[in-house]
Amino acid sequence: MSYLFLEDDELQMIWDAINNAQLIFHPNHAPIGSVDYSKFQSLNREKNIILFLDRNLLSGLLSLTKNGDLEDDKEKRMIALLMVWCQMNCLSVSAGLAIMENAFRDHNSYNAKIELNNFNNIFNFYPTQAWLYLADGRLDQIPKYNFSTIPYENSITYHKCTIPLSLYIRIHIQN
Protein backbone atom coordinates (compact mmCIF):
# COMPACT_ATOMS: atom_id res chain seq x y z
CA MET A 1 0.00 0.00 0.00
CA SER A 2 1.22 3.46 -0.88
CA TYR A 3 0.56 6.68 0.99
CA LEU A 4 0.16 10.20 -0.30
CA PHE A 5 0.88 13.21 1.86
CA LEU A 6 -0.50 16.42 0.44
CA GLU A 7 0.50 19.82 1.74
CA ASP A 8 -1.28 23.18 1.53
CA ASP A 9 -2.98 23.49 -1.85
CA GLU A 10 -1.51 20.39 -3.55
CA LEU A 11 -4.91 18.71 -3.85
CA GLN A 12 -6.29 21.72 -5.69
CA MET A 13 -3.11 21.92 -7.80
CA ILE A 14 -3.60 18.31 -8.92
CA TRP A 15 -7.25 18.84 -9.87
CA ASP A 16 -6.50 22.11 -11.64
CA ALA A 17 -3.61 20.57 -13.56
CA ILE A 18 -5.73 17.56 -14.63
CA ASN A 19 -8.45 19.89 -15.88
CA ASN A 20 -6.05 22.31 -17.57
CA ALA A 21 -4.27 19.46 -19.36
CA GLN A 22 -7.63 17.98 -20.46
CA LEU A 23 -6.46 14.42 -19.82
CA ILE A 24 -9.80 12.95 -18.78
CA PHE A 25 -12.65 12.60 -21.27
CA HIS A 26 -16.08 11.08 -20.91
CA PRO A 27 -19.15 11.95 -23.03
CA ASN A 28 -21.32 12.71 -19.98
CA HIS A 29 -18.96 13.54 -17.12
CA ALA A 30 -16.04 15.25 -18.84
CA PRO A 31 -16.95 15.99 -22.48
CA ILE A 32 -14.39 18.82 -22.81
CA GLY A 33 -11.72 17.26 -20.58
CA SER A 34 -12.74 19.06 -17.40
CA VAL A 35 -13.83 17.08 -14.34
CA ASP A 36 -16.08 18.59 -11.66
CA TYR A 37 -14.60 17.53 -8.31
CA SER A 38 -17.85 17.17 -6.35
CA LYS A 39 -19.71 15.36 -9.15
CA PHE A 40 -16.73 13.08 -9.65
CA GLN A 41 -16.53 12.20 -5.95
CA SER A 42 -20.24 11.43 -5.89
CA LEU A 43 -19.98 9.26 -9.00
CA ASN A 44 -16.91 7.51 -7.57
CA ARG A 45 -18.92 6.52 -4.47
CA GLU A 46 -21.80 5.19 -6.59
CA LYS A 47 -19.93 3.33 -9.35
CA ASN A 48 -16.61 1.72 -10.08
CA ILE A 49 -14.77 4.16 -12.29
CA ILE A 50 -12.19 2.76 -14.67
CA LEU A 51 -9.72 4.94 -16.52
CA PHE A 52 -8.84 3.52 -19.95
CA LEU A 53 -5.40 4.57 -21.14
CA ASP A 54 -4.90 5.19 -24.81
CA ARG A 55 -1.88 3.83 -26.65
CA ASN A 56 0.06 7.11 -26.42
CA LEU A 57 -0.30 7.33 -22.64
CA LEU A 58 0.53 3.66 -22.14
CA SER A 59 3.60 3.89 -24.37
CA GLY A 60 4.77 6.97 -22.51
CA LEU A 61 4.18 5.36 -19.12
CA LEU A 62 6.06 2.21 -20.08
CA SER A 63 8.94 4.21 -21.54
CA LEU A 64 9.12 6.46 -18.48
CA THR A 65 9.21 3.54 -16.06
CA LYS A 66 11.65 1.50 -18.13
CA ASN A 67 14.10 4.41 -18.54
CA GLY A 68 13.31 6.45 -15.43
CA ASP A 69 12.91 9.55 -17.58
CA LEU A 70 11.47 10.88 -20.83
CA GLU A 71 12.95 13.38 -23.25
CA ASP A 72 9.69 15.33 -23.31
CA ASP A 73 9.49 16.92 -19.87
CA LYS A 74 5.87 17.97 -20.32
CA GLU A 75 4.78 14.43 -21.24
CA LYS A 76 6.71 13.04 -18.25
CA ARG A 77 4.98 15.45 -15.85
CA MET A 78 1.54 14.76 -17.37
CA ILE A 79 1.95 10.99 -17.02
CA ALA A 80 3.07 11.41 -13.41
CA LEU A 81 0.16 13.76 -12.75
CA LEU A 82 -2.30 11.23 -14.16
CA MET A 83 -0.78 8.43 -12.08
CA VAL A 84 -1.01 10.40 -8.83
CA TRP A 85 -4.56 11.51 -9.66
CA CYS A 86 -5.69 7.93 -10.31
CA GLN A 87 -4.08 6.61 -7.18
CA MET A 88 -5.33 9.39 -4.90
CA ASN A 89 -8.86 8.72 -6.16
CA CYS A 90 -8.48 4.92 -5.90
CA LEU A 91 -9.32 4.47 -9.58
CA SER A 92 -8.79 1.31 -11.53
CA VAL A 93 -6.62 1.89 -14.57
CA SER A 94 -6.94 -0.31 -17.64
CA ALA A 95 -4.46 -0.65 -20.47
CA GLY A 96 -6.50 -3.36 -22.16
CA LEU A 97 -7.57 -1.38 -25.20
CA ALA A 98 -4.06 0.00 -25.78
CA ILE A 99 -2.56 -3.46 -25.39
CA MET A 100 -5.18 -4.93 -27.74
CA GLU A 101 -4.33 -2.25 -30.30
CA ASN A 102 -0.67 -3.26 -30.41
CA ALA A 103 -1.45 -6.98 -30.33
CA PHE A 104 -3.87 -6.64 -33.24
CA ARG A 105 -1.34 -4.63 -35.25
CA ASP A 106 1.48 -7.13 -34.53
CA HIS A 107 -0.77 -10.25 -34.76
CA ASN A 108 0.82 -11.32 -31.47
CA SER A 109 -0.69 -11.78 -28.01
CA TYR A 110 2.51 -13.00 -26.35
CA ASN A 111 4.17 -9.57 -26.36
CA ALA A 112 0.88 -7.99 -25.31
CA LYS A 113 0.79 -10.21 -22.24
CA ILE A 114 4.38 -9.25 -21.35
CA GLU A 115 3.40 -5.60 -21.68
CA LEU A 116 0.31 -6.18 -19.51
CA ASN A 117 2.39 -7.90 -16.83
CA ASN A 118 4.80 -4.97 -16.69
CA PHE A 119 1.95 -2.46 -16.66
CA ASN A 120 0.32 -4.20 -13.70
CA ASN A 121 3.58 -4.39 -11.75
CA ILE A 122 4.32 -0.69 -12.18
CA PHE A 123 1.49 0.19 -9.79
CA ASN A 124 3.10 -1.80 -6.97
CA PHE A 125 6.64 -0.64 -7.70
CA TYR A 126 6.24 3.14 -7.45
CA PRO A 127 4.91 4.91 -4.37
CA THR A 128 2.22 7.50 -5.04
CA GLN A 129 4.38 10.19 -3.46
CA ALA A 130 7.04 9.63 -6.15
CA TRP A 131 4.44 10.33 -8.86
CA LEU A 132 3.48 13.57 -7.09
CA TYR A 133 7.11 14.67 -6.80
CA LEU A 134 7.73 13.87 -10.47
CA ALA A 135 4.56 15.71 -11.50
CA ASP A 136 5.39 18.89 -9.59
CA GLY A 137 9.10 18.93 -10.46
CA ARG A 138 10.62 17.93 -7.12
CA LEU A 139 11.97 14.89 -8.94
CA ASP A 140 13.37 14.87 -12.46
CA GLN A 141 13.60 11.09 -12.73
CA ILE A 142 12.20 7.99 -11.10
CA PRO A 143 13.99 4.69 -10.48
CA LYS A 144 14.01 2.44 -13.50
CA TYR A 145 11.63 -0.47 -13.27
CA ASN A 146 13.28 -3.74 -14.27
CA PHE A 147 10.89 -4.99 -16.96
CA SER A 148 9.99 -8.66 -16.93
CA THR A 149 9.85 -10.93 -19.94
CA ILE A 150 7.23 -13.12 -18.30
CA PRO A 151 3.78 -12.83 -19.87
CA TYR A 152 0.66 -12.19 -17.81
CA GLU A 153 -1.27 -15.42 -17.46
CA ASN A 154 -4.78 -15.25 -18.87
CA SER A 155 -6.71 -16.91 -21.67
CA ILE A 156 -7.30 -13.75 -23.73
CA THR A 157 -6.07 -13.74 -27.30
CA TYR A 158 -5.59 -9.99 -27.68
CA HIS A 159 -4.73 -10.03 -31.36
CA LYS A 160 -7.90 -11.96 -32.27
CA CYS A 161 -10.48 -9.88 -30.41
CA THR A 162 -13.56 -9.60 -32.57
CA ILE A 163 -15.44 -6.80 -30.78
CA PRO A 164 -14.93 -3.52 -32.66
CA LEU A 165 -13.14 -1.09 -30.37
CA SER A 166 -15.79 1.62 -30.82
CA LEU A 167 -18.49 -0.79 -29.63
CA TYR A 168 -16.30 -1.96 -26.74
CA ILE A 169 -15.78 1.63 -25.59
CA ARG A 170 -19.52 2.40 -25.79
CA ILE A 171 -20.39 -0.70 -23.75
CA HIS A 172 -18.05 0.27 -20.93
CA ILE A 173 -19.08 3.91 -20.91
CA GLN A 174 -22.76 3.08 -20.68
CA ASN A 175 -22.39 0.72 -17.71
Image (tube, grey):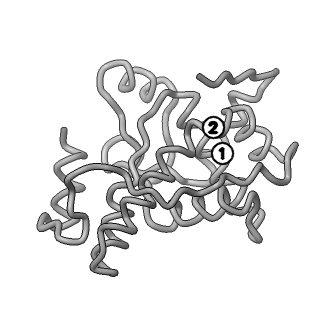
Residue type of the residue flagged with mark 1: Leu
| Mark 2 residue element | helix
| Mark 1 residue element | helix
Rounded to the nearest angstrom, the CA distance separating label 1 from label 2 is 5 Å
**Which of these two is toward me, 15 or 171?**
171
> What residue is rendered at 73% in x and 54% in y?
144
Residue type of the residue flagged with mark 2: Val
Q: Quadrant of the N terminus?
A: top right
> What residue is rendered at 49% in x and 27% in y?
90
Residue wearing tag 2: 84
Residue 131 image point, x, y percent: 70, 41
Residue wearing tag 1: 81
Residue 106 image point, x, y percent: 34, 81
Query: Quarter of the image holding residue 97?
Result: bottom left
**Which of these two is toward me, 36 or 149?**
149
Relative to 15, say whether 158 is above or below: below
| Residue 70 placement, left or right of 24 | right
| Residue 3 placement, left or right of 8 | left
